[in-house]
Image: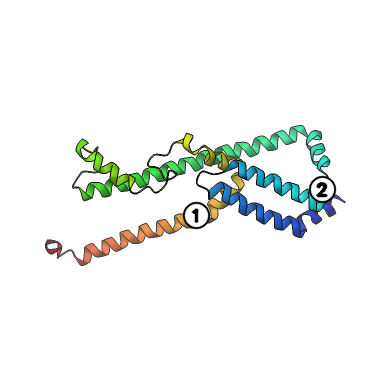
Amino acid sequence: MEVFAFSMLFGSFWFWSYSIILFVALCIFVENTDDGSPLGGFFAFMLYNGLLWWHLDVPVGAVFSAINDNPGTTFVYLLSYFGIGTAWGTWKWYRVLKKAAKKLLKLKIKFCNNNNLDPNVPLPEKAKKEWKEFRDGHYSSWRDQPAPEAMQNKSRITSWMAFWPVSFFWFITADFLTNAWDWCYEFMSIFFGNMRKRIFKDLTDVM
C-alpha cells in the first residue's frame, strides 16, 4: 500500500507540475534577486506543500505523527541539512569575496597602467580621489561592491544556507557555464595578446 501511494505521489501530474514551479521560484528567490529572499523561498515551499496536500489528499496529521514518532531521526535529518547548508553558505560567501577581490585588483592594475603608476605599491594620496571615481564607475549596483560585507548580504547568505540543494544545482549548471565562459575568454585574451606582440614586435617604435 505504501509503495502504491509513493508511486502515485511521485508519478502524478500535479506533483511534477508544482515541483517544477517550486524549483523555478526557489532559483529566483535564492540566486536571481538583488539580495536573496529566504522568506520568499519559505512561503513558496509552504505553498507547494499546501497545494500537494490539497490535490493529492495527503493527510497532514500523518506527517506530524511520523515526526512525533521519530524525533531522533528527524533531529539527525535537520542537523545534517542545516550543517551542510552552513558549510555551503560559507563556501559561497568565500567565492563572492574572492571574485570581488579579483575584480578590484584588475581595476587597480588598469588604473595604474592608465596613469603610469606601479600597481604593486599603495596608491599615492594625490591619485586616490581619481581612483575612487574610476572604481565607482565600474560598480553598477550595491550588490556589486568593491569589498562586500556579510551584514549587508545577510539575506543572500541565509538563502544559500536554507535552500542549499537549489543553490548547489544552480552552481553546477548556470554558475559552471558562466565560469567556463569567463575562463575561455581570459585564455583567448592572453592568446590574442601574445599574437599581437609577435606580429608587432618590430614596430613598437611607431605604435
> In x, y percent, where is residue 102?
37, 46
From this viewpoint, is residue 196 visible?
A: yes
Asked whether 109 or 141 is in front, the reply is 141
> In x, y percent, where is residue 41?
62, 45
Label 2 near label 1: C-beta < 8 Å?
no
Residue shown at 59%/44% (left/top)? 164
> Is 76 above or below relative to 141?
above
Asked whether 62 or 84 is in front, the reply is 62
View extreme (bottom): residue? 199
The kind of secondary structure element at disc 2 is: loop
From this viewpoint, is residue 120 visible?
A: no
Residue holding disc 2: 58
> In x, y percent, where is residue 179?
45, 54
Please tell me how crowded label 2 is: few (under 14), some (14-19), or many (20+) other residues with Cα within 10 Å: some
Kind of residue indicated by mark 2: Val
Residue holding disc 1: 176
* The C terminus sits in image quarter: bottom left
